[in-house]
């Protein structure tokens, strides 16, 4: 099948390479010329496990372009996966989605049959708006085409993007047109049947069940995406709230998570207490669903509270530190981890960035380490009050306290005895509950976790 994908960010690029791997002819378009030049050399512009290998494996099935070219228009499916950044009122900006739809409709040929698919996370009604734009553009051009429309939200996680795409839990297709649903079911046939050999860097889990195909209407598909992210964000805020109570009464939140997570109705995932969620999705999407609700004069107190708890959690890390060192001004604070989660260099809405900014405002000097996110983090700060170190032990030298803000696996492997000796005072705030409190004590650390 010929597929054109507009936007080569996390979602667009992962979808493009995965569909190319499954045998489709894919054209990946992005206006960012440097991104496309890099992709033409099979170098991934995003840090994602397996992406460079997959670019090599699929190079005969995929074409990258930063200008609209005629080959693009031959596609049966036009998949829109451009950004929907937040606006000042919290709503998602669909300007890029609208212009992508308009530009593609400008290129369609008389009599062409194709399906427009929105994969970007978009506010309610956007699919309807795209339909209107495409039909209007065709009318202005005085041509007739047979165009169907579908919403196909994406559920991949950064750092596990290819795994989530090749082994999804479900595929959601929203459309009021059975033809569009048939075409997308055909496009995803190999994922739905799992009748492909995964690339060598991925293993299909032994207990993996075939993904559910959920077909529904356009608006419900749009809401499914927001509801999924809002639910997961709320689940994390819930355990963070319980963590606060655990600290008051002397319980261990990791034990609570273990105890409740075994109940299948609750599930064990997304119950890790920490500095609160970050990244480019949960903050933006919880804000966007509230913006939608406001338009209908509808109150959503649970999602509002989830956001409030999340903001409080950043301050809670500062309070844990203050309990230990009392005065922040004039202290050297070592930060381990800058990315919003491990195995990514993405620092968008990262808890580490928020915590560092508060500490700087309060007069601390920051020495920070991250295995891969330093370059992105640098852009967030002026360099006067922060030292970036390539080595975690070096970052800990002479520190008055150390905070783990991203649970990089390599921090488990650190020689914590040595770290304790290098520090001025061996105070560790483990904001991700990554270390075992017993081992930390053995290493000579003055250890504080979250909710334990
Ligand atoms: C999230 C969703 O998990 C994906 O399903 C969705 O497709 C994606 O948003 C999106 O909308 O594009 P992502 O933001 O990449 O994916 O990362 P997550 O793994 O969900 O983590 C989000 C944040 O929650 C991170 O800051 C992470 O550290 C935090 N988190 C996660 C916790 O604090 N505790 C947990 O138990 C789990």
Image (spheres, rainbow, N blue to C red):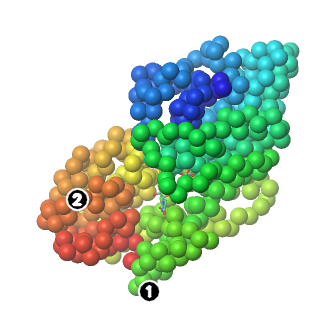
In x, y percent, where is residue 411?
Answer: 28, 58
Q: Are marks 1 and 2 in contact (CB under 8 Å)?
A: no
- 166 up-or-down from 404: above or below: above
- 267 up-or-down from 104: above or below: below
Label 1 CA crowd tier, 10 Å (few <14, some 14–19, many 20+): few
In x, y percent, where is residue 241?
Answer: 52, 73
Label 2 CA crowd tier, 10 Å (few <14, some 14–19, many 20+): few
Q: Name the foreground residue: 177 vs 360.
A: 177
In x, y percent, where is residue 208?
Answer: 55, 54
Quadrant assignment for the N terminus: top right
Disc marking residue 249: 1
**Front tag of 1 and 2:** 2
Residue 387 is left or right of residue 76, and the answer is left
In x, y percent, where is residue 89?
Answer: 65, 49
Determine the secondary structure under disc 1.
helix
Which residue is drawn at the image coordinates 24% and 72% (left, top)? Answer: 439
Quadrant assignment for the C terminus: bottom left
Disc marking residue 414: 2
Determine the secondary structure under disc 2.
loop
Asked if the beta carbon under badge 2 is closer than 8 A to the nearest atom of ligand 1, the reply is no
Q: Name the foreground residue: 19 vs 382.
A: 19
Which residue is drawn at the image coordinates 66% and 38% (left, top)? Answer: 189
N-terminal-most mark, 1 or 2 = 1
Which residue is drawn at the image coordinates 59% and 25% (left, top)? Answer: 26
The answer for how far apart the CA atoms under marks 1 and 2 are is 31 Å
């Amino acid at each position: 099948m010929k597929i054109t994908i507009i936007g080569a960010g996390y979602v667009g690029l992962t979808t493009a390479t995965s569909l190319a791997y499954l045998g489709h002819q894919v054209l990946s378009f992005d206006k960012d010329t440097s991104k496309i030049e890099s992709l033409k050399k099979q170098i991934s512009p995003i840090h994602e496990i397996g992406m460079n290998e997959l670019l090599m494996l699929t190079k005969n099935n995929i074409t990258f372009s930063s200008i609209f070219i005629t080959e693009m228009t031959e596609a049966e499916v036009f998949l829109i996966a451009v950004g929907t950044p937040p606006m000042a009122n919290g709503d998602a900006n669909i300007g890029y989605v609208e212009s992508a739809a308009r530009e593609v409709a400008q290129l369609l040929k008389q009599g062409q049959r194709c399906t427009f698919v929105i994969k970007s996370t978009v506010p309610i009604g956007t699919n309807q708006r795209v339909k209107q734009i495409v039909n209007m553009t065709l009318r202005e051009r005085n041509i007739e085409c047979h165009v169907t429309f579908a919403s196909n939200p994406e559920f991949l996680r950064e750092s596990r993007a290819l795994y989530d795409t090749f082994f999804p839990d479900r595929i959601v297709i929203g459309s009021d047109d059975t033809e569009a649903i048939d075409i997308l079911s055909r496009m995803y046939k190999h994922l739905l049947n799992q009748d492909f050999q995964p690339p060598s860097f991925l293993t299909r889990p032994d207990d993996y069940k075939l993904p559910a195909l959920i077909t529904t209407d356009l608006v419900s598909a749009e809401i499914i995406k927001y509801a999924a992210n809002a639910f997961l964000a709320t689940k994390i805020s819930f355990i963070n709230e319980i963590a606060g109570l655990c600290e008051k009464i002397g319980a261990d939140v990791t034990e609570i998570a273990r105890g409740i997570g075994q109940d299948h109705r609750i599930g064990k995932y997304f119950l890790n207490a920490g500095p609160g969620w970050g990244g480019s999705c949960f903050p933006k999407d919880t804000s966007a669903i509230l913006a939608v609700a406001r338009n209908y004069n509808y109150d959503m107190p649970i999602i509002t509270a989830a956001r409030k708890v999340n903001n409080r959690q950043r301050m809670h890390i500062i309070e844990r530190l203050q309990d230990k060192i009392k005065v922040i001004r004039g202290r050297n604070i070592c930060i381990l981890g800058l990315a919003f989660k491990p195995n990514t260099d993405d620092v968008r809405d990262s808890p580490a960035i928020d915590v560092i900014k508060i500490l700087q405002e309060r007069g601390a000097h920051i020495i920070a380490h991250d295995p891969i996110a330093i370059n992105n983090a640098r852009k967030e700060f002026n360099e006067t009050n922060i030292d970036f170190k390539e080595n975690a032990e070096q970052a800990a030298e002479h520190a008055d306290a150390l905070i783990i803000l991203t649970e990089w696996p390599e921090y488990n492997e650190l020689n914590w005895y040595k770290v304790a000796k290098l520090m001025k005072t061996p105070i560790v705030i483990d904001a991700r509950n990554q270390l075992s409190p017993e081992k930390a004590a053995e290493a000579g650390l003055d250890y504080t976790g979250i909710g334990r």
